[in-house]
Image: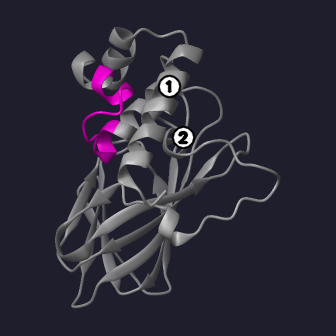
Amino acid sequence: MSDPAAALRAVAHNVRAARLRAGLSPDELGRRAQVGKGALVALEKAQGNPDLATLLRLAEALGISASALMQGSPAGRVRVVASDEVVPLWTGERGSEARLVLTTSAATPVEIWRWRLAPGVEYPSHPHQAGVVETVSVTSGRMVLIIDGVEHEVGEGQTATFDGDTPHAYRGAGGATCDLVMTVQLPPGPAPGA
């Protein structure tokens, strides 16, 4: 979906449908996801501009993947996603961005992300629910992975993995833009409290 308005309409439809399937009121979903009721009602009407952190909190509270909020169900057994169909869910300085490419439909879903981090640009991530495992593979450049305040440099051709239920951040390092592929393995079943 290269059209931002179409992407917002898809998110609005999917959030409302998932909330109704879960039997949650807007108040209850807002409380669980730490999103104000007014913001949630506006989102379900395809108004506003939800950020990545909000979408991730909503997905966790609904017990679904973030990409399930962005995309419909796959048609057939093979799903091919073109790069121009994937809108950035986060943009930072100097061309930094994160794009959720797709989520597998297995019993333990895996989200697949493409990230681009300019040197010195940092994205802090809130801790995810217990059981989430992240893996980052740097395809060009270098990055610093910060886990619980400890920095780990990951260079081109290197891969790092960690439990995502701890504070973490990603920062571009060196003199060139860092491109990486990230996978986020989600635990089976609904999020705690969902």
Question: Which of 105 and 41 lies nearest the eye of the viewer?
Answer: 41
Q: Which residue is mark 2?
A: 65
At x 44%, y 61%, the residue is 2
Q: Amino acid at mark 2?
A: Ser
Q: Does residue 135 appear to the left or right of 122 in the view shown?
A: right
Q: Which residue is mark 1?
A: 62
Give the mark count: 2
What kind of residue is marked 1? Leu
Colour scheme used in the picture? Answer: one colour
Residue 174 point in image, percent of width and height: 23, 87
User: Residue 126: percent from the left, percent from the top?
Assistant: 30, 43
> Residue 100 bears which disc, if any?
none
Q: 162 or 141, which lies in front? A: 141
- Name the side, left or right, on which 49 lies relative to 88: left
Check the image and report above or below for 26 versus 172: above
Give how far across and how far down residue 118 sits, in percent: 24, 78
As drawn, is 88 to the left or to the right of 106?
left
CA gap between label 2 and label 1 equals 9 Å
Stretch of the chain drawn in magenta: 41-54
Q: Residue at x 21, y 80 (%)?
A: 119
Rendering quarter of residue 151: bottom left
Per the image, label 2 sits on a secondary structure element best described as loop
| Residue at image location 29% in from the left, 40% down from the top | 50
The magenta stretch spans residue 141:
no
Depth check, front residue: 113 or 172: 113
